[in-house]
């Protein structure tokens, strides 16, 4: 008798309730999905951009129609506040689908031309083939969209592995594609663990590109495995975003921006504001302002529209966050708010917003990604020092600068080493603009036309346009042959 399939329980982290039990895929399912993708891709790749756009448009439309169902499922499987799911995760994903539907029809390249007198050159942008995608648990629907839409828009087939703990909205999204007629095999979702399904996918010889979003350590492993192909790799990894407040900043705006930037999605956001550097004259007032604002944050039932902060992804994540905070306190930091551990009344996955001061720049809490509702505030004196402290990190995903001085803003936008720099805000993203990091935050771009380009191969087609048999340049190979001429008379 065959072994019973291994199941994974998808839990609501806020309550511990089991929402669903799913069968875990293994290496055989990876192989079957990749072979199906290989078979289906040529037809999908040959569809016109307009036909591919139509599929994406229809999916965007269905997502809008069923927005509430998606939002509720996202909130239940993540513990994130329903307001966030309704106002960001779901509409952001349908907007992204709409963007890539349009972008599919607007692939750009160099103009065709005679870059050598005898040849006409043109550029083709072709699909790569089969893309193996791996996504994290923090914004499951959104991340699935970021991976699937540009890859399909460019004519690839996709096999995607969401995080196995909350794959429900990725599966629902794939069903929308089936509903609108995407051919079988062009998109497959595999529910499985990283070491088994993730590694089998990125190592599969028939996978042409690996697109990964997740932590930096796992990203390194994925890049190593993919390099054995070798195959193209796109890595969206961790972050430790600085939030730099200069002494001329609008203090109220900076305080609100810091709290929103640190607490969004429970701080489980790769671009979350994690390290606020505040110029000395504003430092005390900034810390007081953030503390007061944190007191107004309502942590509770994620399904209640009045809730600001839901649970974290799991009790384990709350313990992990508390490990960082406890070590920071032991190393000399002071908790102005929070820092007391998982919430006893609400449940083990709830963690109160935590504001830390007096941490050293080289402390773990300032250097490593915590992925929880924790903000550390540090002072600085000169502009040079503030920017240097902000850049003193191995990550480079996002950063923000708060100032009303146009020259400071310009300098910060040039000098902050990150894939995105906000001026007087922190967090907003738009489908038209790229998202992606430098340094240990990875390489490659999600969203925008840049992402579409990543999922294509650039082909140069060079057509000789004189009809002359013996080309002038052949002299570099056949010594003694006279130059340009037309054939038999040489
Ligand atoms: P993670 O690295 O633990 O897991 C990400 C995905 O990789 C999951 O699907 C997981 O199952 C899979 N995986 C785990 N081990 C694997 C292996 N050996 N081979 C292949 N796949 C494997 O990350 P996470 O905890 O799910 O997500 C949080 C991380 O994601 C944070 O570091 C965050 O900053 C990062 N993130 C980055 C971005 C970005 O755009 N840069 C966006 C969201 C999240």
Image (cartoon, rainbow, N blue to C red):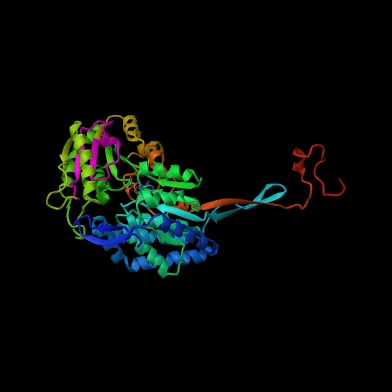
Q: Nearer the viewer, residue 282 or 484?
A: 484
Magenta segment includes 104: no
Exactly how many numbered labels are in the figure?
A: 0
Residue 437 visible, this angle = no
Quadrant including the C terminus: top right
Residue 158: image location, x then y, percent: 45, 58
Instruction: Tell me if 439 is positioned left or right of 124 in this view.
Output: left
Residue 260: image location, x then y, percent: 25, 48
Residue 167 visible, this angle = yes
Residue reaching furthest to the front:
1
Q: Nearer the viewer, residue 311 or 378?
A: 311
Q: Is residue 146 above or below residue 220?
A: below
Q: Which stretch is magenta?
A: 349-377
Residue drawn 26% across the image and 58% down it: 9
Question: What is the quadrant of residue 382 in the picture?
Answer: top left
Question: What is the quadrant of residue 191 in the picture?
Answer: bottom left
Instruction: Tell me if 344 is positioned left or right of 311 in this view.
Output: left
Residue reaching furthest to the right:
489
Residue 341: image location, x then y, percent: 16, 44
Instruction: Tell me if 319 is positioned left or right of 142 in this view.
Output: left
Q: Is residue 353 above or below residue 360?
A: below
Quadrant including the N terminus: bottom left
Question: What is the quadrant of residue 272 in the picture?
Answer: top left
Instruction: Tell me if 468 is positioned left or right of 282 in this view.
Output: right
Residue 117: image location, x then y, percent: 71, 47
Residue drawn 31% across the image and 44% down it: 424
Q: Nearer the viewer, residue 486 or 297?
A: 486
Magenta segment includes 368: yes
């Amino acid at each position: 008798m065959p072994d019973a399939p291994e199941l994974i329980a998808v839990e609501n982290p806020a309550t511990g309730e089991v929402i669903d039990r799913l069968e875990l895929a293994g290496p055989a399912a990876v192989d079957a999905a990749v072979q199906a993708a290989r078979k289906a891709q040529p037809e999908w790749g040959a569809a016109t951009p307009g036909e591919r756009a139509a599929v994406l448009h229809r999916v965007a439309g269905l997502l809008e129609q069923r927005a509430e169902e998606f939002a509720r499922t996202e909130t239940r499987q993540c513990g994130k506040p329903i307001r966030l799911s309704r106002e960001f995760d779901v509409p952001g994903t349908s907007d992204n689908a709409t963007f890539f539907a349009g972008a599919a029809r607007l692939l750009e390249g160099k103009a065709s031309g005679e870059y050598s007198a005898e040849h006409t050159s043109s550029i083709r942008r072709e699909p790569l083939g089969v893309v193996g995608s791996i996504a994290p648990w923090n914004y499951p629907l959104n991340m699935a969209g970021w991976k699937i839409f540009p890859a399909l828009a460019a004519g690839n087939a996709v096999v995607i592995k969401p995080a196995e703990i909350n794959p429900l909205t990725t599966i629902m999204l794939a069903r929308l594609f089936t509903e609108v007629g995407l051919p079988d095999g062009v998109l497959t979702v595999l529910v499985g663990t990283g070491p088994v399904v993730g590694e089998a996918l990125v190592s599969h010889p028939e996978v042409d590109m690996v697109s990964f979003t997740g932590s930096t350590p796992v990203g390194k492993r994925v890049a190593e495995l993919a390099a054995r192909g070798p195959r193209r790799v796109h890595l969206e990894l961790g972050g430790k975003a600085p939030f730099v407040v200069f002494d001329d900043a609008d203090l109220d705006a900076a305080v609100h921006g810091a709290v929103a930037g640190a607490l969004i999605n429970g701080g489980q956001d790769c671009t979350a504001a994690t390290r606020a550097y505040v110029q000395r004259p504003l430092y005390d007032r900034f810390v007081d302002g953030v503390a007061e604002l944190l007191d107004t944050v309502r942590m509770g039932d994620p399904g209640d529209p009045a809730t600001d902060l839901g649970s974290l992804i799991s009790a384990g994540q709350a313990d992990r966050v508390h490990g960082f905070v406890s070590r920071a306190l032991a190393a000399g930091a002071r908790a102005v708010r929070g820092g007391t551990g998982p919430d006893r009344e609400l449940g083990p996955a709830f963690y109160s917003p935590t504001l830390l001061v007096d941490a050293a720049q080289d402390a773990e809490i300032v250097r490593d990604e915590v992925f929880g509702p924790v903000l550390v505030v540090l002072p600085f004196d000169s502009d040079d020092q503030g920017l240097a402290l902000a850049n003193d990190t191995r990550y480079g995903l996002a950063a923000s600068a708060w100032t009303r001085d146009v020259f400071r803003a310009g300098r910060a936008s040039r000098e902050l080493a990150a894939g995105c720099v906000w001026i007087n805000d922190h967090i907003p993203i738009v489908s038209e603009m790229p998202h992606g990091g430098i340094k240990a935050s990875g390489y490659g771009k999600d969203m925008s036309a840049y992402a579409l380009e990543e999922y294509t191969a650039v082909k140069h087609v060079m057509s000789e346009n004189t009809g002359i048999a013996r080309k002038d340049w052949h002299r570099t190979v056949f010594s003694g042959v006279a130059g340009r001429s037309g054939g038999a008379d040489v």
